[in-house]
Amino acid sequence: MHPTDPAEQARLNARLHELRTEHRGLDAAVARLQLDAGADELLVKRLKKRKLQLKDCIERLESALIPDEPA
């Protein structure tokens, strides 16, 4: 379902930007932690899980923002 309301589309685009920013931040944090031999493995796993959740949300929003193609 593609939002037709410009305000809704703008809100979804803003949310998509927020999610991508958070995903990049988590990616950097995970990379830093993995360089540290004494890093908390549970924390790394939690951050990776959050990254996957964000990726799923990003993909759903991107799909919602793409207009439907007529068959």
Image (spheres, rainbow, N blue to C red):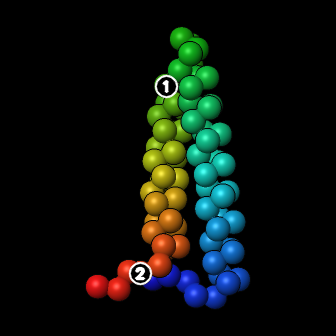
Quickly name the residue at label 2: 68
Residue 61 lies left or right of residue 28; in this view the side is: left
Snapshot quadrant of residue 4: bottom right
- The answer to whether 20 appears left or right of 2 in the picture is right
Q: Assign the N terminus to one quadrant of the image.
A: bottom left
Q: Could you tell me residue 70's position as x and y percent?
A: 35, 86
For residue 52, side relative to residue 22 (left or right): left
Residue 9 appears left or right of 34: right
Relative to 50, say whether 64 is above or below: below
Q: What is the x, y in percent for residue 64?
A: 48, 74
> Type of residue at label 2?
Asp
Q: Sequence order check: which comes first, mark 1 or mark 2?
A: 1
Q: Residues within 10 Å of mark 2 (few under 14, many from 20)?
A: few
Q: Residue at 56% across / 26% down in the picture? A: 31
- Could you tell me which secondary element the residue under label 2 belongs to? loop
Q: Position of residue 57 (x, y in %)?
A: 50, 61
**Disc 1 residue type?**
Glu
Q: Residues within 10 Å of mark 1 (few under 14, many from 20)?
A: few
Can you tell which quarter of the image residue 27 is in?
Answer: top right
Specify the quadrant that holds the C terminus. bottom left
Image location (x, y in percent) of residue 48: 48, 38
Is 53 rendered above or below residue 25?
A: below
Pick the front one: 45 or 32:
32
Q: Nearer the viewer, residue 12 or 38?
A: 12
Residue at position x 61%, y 41% in the image: 24
Q: Which residue is mark 1?
A: 41
Residues under labels 1 and 2: Cα distance?
42 Å
